[in-house]
Amino acid sequence: MRMTSIALALVAGSALAQGHKVVAPVSAKEMQPGYGVVQSVTPVRFAPERSAAAGGSAAKDEAARPMYRVAVRMPDGSMQYRDLDRPEFKVGDNVLLTNAGDIVPD
């Protein structure tokens, strides 16, 4: 348990040192489809998930991969978030959030 805490602290410290916010992935139940406008694109790193397989590389690989959290303002004023592996959108872009959780240009 202690090693997991130390590993998490090291990953979080490394991401913060690189200027990346450490976040949990957006869950599918939080995603709603619709049209909106990109409000921000923020570089992030995923917090590694705790697993029974201590020392596994999947969590490390996921945390090391650069990602971008895209915030989209919907017509009703709510915000939707999606995580992308490329910064393909910029603030002010009109986009469509799909049922599958993707973002496509509008």
Image (cartoon, helix red, strand yellow):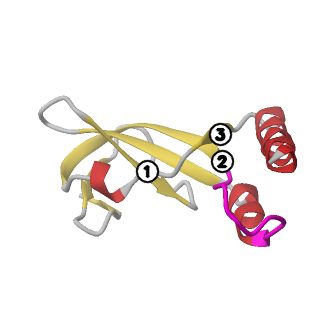
Q: Residue at x 29, y 69 (%)?
A: 100
- Amino acid found under the numbered disc labelled 3: Val
Residue 90 point in image, percent of width and height: 45, 44
- Amino acid found under the numbered disc labelled 2: Ala
Q: CA distance from mark 2 to mark 1?
A: 12 Å
Q: Main secondary structure of the magenta part?
A: loop
Of badges 2 and 3, nearer the viewer stands 2
Q: CA distance from mark 3 to mark 1?
A: 12 Å
Residue 22, label in figure: 3
Secondary element type, mark 3: strand
The mark total stands at 3
- The answer to whether 47 appears left or right of 18 in the picture is left
Question: Which sits earlier in the primary sequence, circle 2 or circle 1?
Answer: 1
- The answer to whether 14 appears left or right of 89 in the picture is right
Q: Residue at x 62, y 44 (%)?
A: 44
Q: From this view, report whether residue 9 is shown above or below residue 34.
A: above
- Examine the structure image and report whether residue 50 is included in the region drawn in magenta: yes
Residue 47, label in figure: 2
Secondary element type, mark 2: loop
Magenta region, residue range: 47-57
Q: Which residue is mark 1?
A: 26
Residue 18 point in image, percent of width and height: 80, 38
Name the residue at the top extreme: 77
Residue closer to the observer: 38 or 51 = 51
Tag 2 near tag 3, CB within 8 Å: yes
- Amino acid found under the numbered disc labelled 1: Val
Q: Residue at x 77, y 33 (%)?
A: 16
- Examine the structure image and report whether residue 60 is included in the region drawn in magenta: no
Question: Which sits earlier in the primary sequence, circle 2 or circle 3?
Answer: 3
Q: Quadrant of residue 97?
A: bottom left
